[in-house]
Amino acid sequence: MANLTRRQWLKVGLAVGGMVTFGLSYRDVAKRAIDGLLNGTSGKVTRDRIFGNALIPEAQAQTHWQQNPQQTIAMTQCFGCWTQCGIRARVNADGKVIRIAGNPYHPLSQEHPIDSSVPFSEAMEQLAGESGLDARSTACARGATLLESLYSPLRLLEPMKRVGKRGEGKWQRISFEQLIEEVVEGGDLFGEGHVDGLRAIHAPDTPIDAKHPSFGPKTNQLLVTNTSDEGRDAFLRRFALNSFGSKNFGAHGAYCGLAYRAGSGALMGDLDKNPHVKPDWENVEFALFMGTSPAQSGNPFKRQARQLASARLRENFQYVVVAPALPLSTVLADPRGRWQPVMPGSDSALAMGMIRWIMDNERYNADYLAIPGVQAMQQAGEQSWTNATHLVIADELPTLAGQHLTLRHLTPDGEETPVVLNTDGELVDASTCRQARLFVTQYVTLADGQRVTVKSGLQRLKEAAEKLSLAQYSEQCGVPEAQIIALAETFTSHGRKAAVISHGGMMAGNGFYNAWSVMMLNALIGNLSLSGGVFVGGGKFNGVSDGPRYNMNSFAGKVKPSGLSIARSKTAYEASEEYRDKIAGGQSPYPAKAPWYPFVAGQLTELLTSALEGYPYPLKAWISNMSNPFYGVPGLRAVAEEKLKDPRRLPLFIAIDAFMNETTALADYIVPDTHNFESWGFTAPWGGVASKATTARWPVVAPATHRTADGQPVSMEAFCIAVAKRLHLPGFGDRAITDPQGNAFSTEPGGRFLSARSR
């Protein structure tokens, strides 16, 4: 052997020692590997040596569809995300969900869903064999793992009450009956002093503040929030708004999609429903995604992913995704699509830069934009129209600035009908004009003798776009000037077979204006409700309103909430008592203590923060159904958590949820709720489905929550019904539901059929 130095001997020793250690560490692994080769498994013993732990098939297909008698297939609704696709759940003989897949009848789970008239066995048969690739209906990763939450050890199954300070995390289990007793009747519930219960708060004839009657009754001191409509929103609204009668109801929309939806709604002329559009995927030739990334985000998530994959197969399809970070939509080496980086929150600069180029180069659809109303639209055979030609008062006059010029401005007995300048240069009623001038700037004398400047809507848009140069827009959004031009040129090179689509990326402080300007691009080419353009969803079937079988919305004693929402929604500050009182006291009315929102509906961000600040009035109780604003609103926890921990600011907090979350952890009481697979509900696609559709959800397994004294599973519905019965609220209990013939039905467990005619 060669002579080795001491250092070399140490190296050899370490190497040998390492080999020995490695061998000892992997002895069991090696043994399992050998066992696997000889016995068919290298780990835990599987059910089958060949097929491992694979599930037994849901059916046999050798001779048509033959369902496995040990399993049932339940078509229901997913709640893995807010797309809420239709899915099919496989349930074994023990009543346990074992797998989730797609519902081939459902438009959110199949690009071309199977017609509802096709028998179930035939539809299932199409999922296999030669038709399997085209007809298959899948669930995404979140949907496929939804059953994990159903059997999660972290589920809340019993009512709980805090026994320490609010937020300390100390709880005790209580019965459902004790829960109802305490939250309704109140008392010294936590050894911290008296807390008003829901009975004391329900005072519809007593004002919150006699000096400020606009606040409404004390009933408004109950706040009820819902995460959003996962199928039971109508039930909770029935309880909160129309039975208890509180004005304060809200959902998570304010910190989810409201900025985008309000901007889109403003462009579409509907700030109540806030409609939004999706592309006609099968015929669109150029799609520009700004603030959404198909196959990665957006709604409907799964459907759009499949539609994008299909569209990429067409040679005449191109798309661009505008996003601050590289999206999954464009990571493939695909010649059809590309990524355009942009500075966060600067989408309006890019959109206005494109609009500037479109105006400068006259690439807008002039014939379409010249249509001023419904009558002209019908005569032209179009599907939509705009107010691009409607005249607007441009002078900075106190009561007139920004108003549309109407016939009433021109003649004392005129109607509130918009005015346009027709092709002959005459001021005429927009509803009777066939074609109007696009660009107008001229003086008009009003009926009271005032001489004002009026401009057409398109003229004002043009001037707004011209305030900055392309170079300045480029500097603001970070998109090179050449790319802004290229996007605008490509977008306007496909006639009306182009579309601009947006969604979650608009959720910024300037999201309303971003969304409005981005959606304006669609208006400039006139692509609404046309092949290759954009469309609004087909709507939903009636699942919660009055119908031919039952009056689900109308009931005796139904309450219409009154007063001021604590979020100050749909209310102008200038119409408030606060504004009036400041004026009367010789003070400047500005600024208000907090923002007022004259255009948008209730916002959970303002509802909660206003409640904690007691502005414009204090609240006494909060019922939260699955709401989690401390997680959903960036920065809210840092500024509001300590305030919510103080019961003096909000004395009673009741959370309803199947799981503990960041906000629920601060509750006084927790009501366990059923899982998505254990409850009833009716939902509809948010968008992207041209046909009318509603998803019916039903319990595919028995609820795991504890039972009430009368044997009902504890849930949001059970809580509302119990509170309503105890307070004798309308719309619940005996004779709660009627049919058009006057027959009445009870919401009591096992309630008997009652006849309104036999009272």
Image (tube, grey):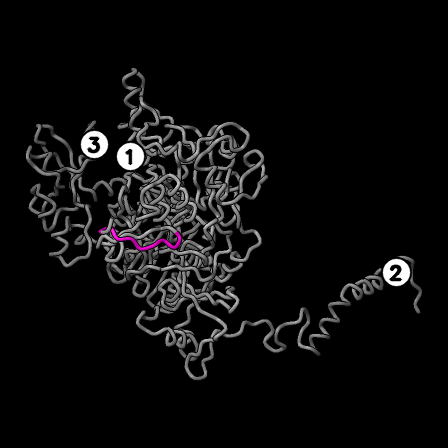
Residue occupying image coordinates x 48% and y 28%: 194
In the image, residue 537 lies at what x, y percent? 29, 57
In the image, residue 417 lies at what x, y percent? 12, 41
Q: Which mark is residue 562?
A: 1
Amino acid, disc 2: Gln
Q: Earlier in the sequence, mark 2 or mark 1?
A: 2
Q: Which mark is residue 401?
A: 3
Amino acid, disc 3: Ala
CA distance separating discs 2 and 3: 91 Å
Instruction: Identify whether 60 is placed above or below 435.
Output: below
Q: Nearer the viewer, residue 351 or 711?
A: 711
Q: Nearer the viewer, mark 2 or mark 3?
A: 3
Q: Earlier in the sequence, mark 3 or mark 1?
A: 3
The verdict on residue 730 being magenta is no
Q: Nearer the viewer, mark 2 or mark 1?
A: 1
Residue occupying image coordinates x 35% and y 30%: 218
In the image, residue 601 lies at what x, y percent? 32, 40
Instruction: Identify whether 39 is placed above or below 204.
Output: below
Neighbourhood count class around disc 2 (C-alpha, 10 Å): few under 14, some 14–19, many 20 upward: few
Contact, mark 3 vs mark 1 (Cβ under 8 Å): no
Magenta residues span 749-757
Neighbourhood count class around disc 1 (C-alpha, 10 Å): few under 14, some 14–19, many 20 upward: some
Q: Nearer the viewer, mark 3 or mark 1?
A: 1
CA distance separating discs 3 and 1: 32 Å
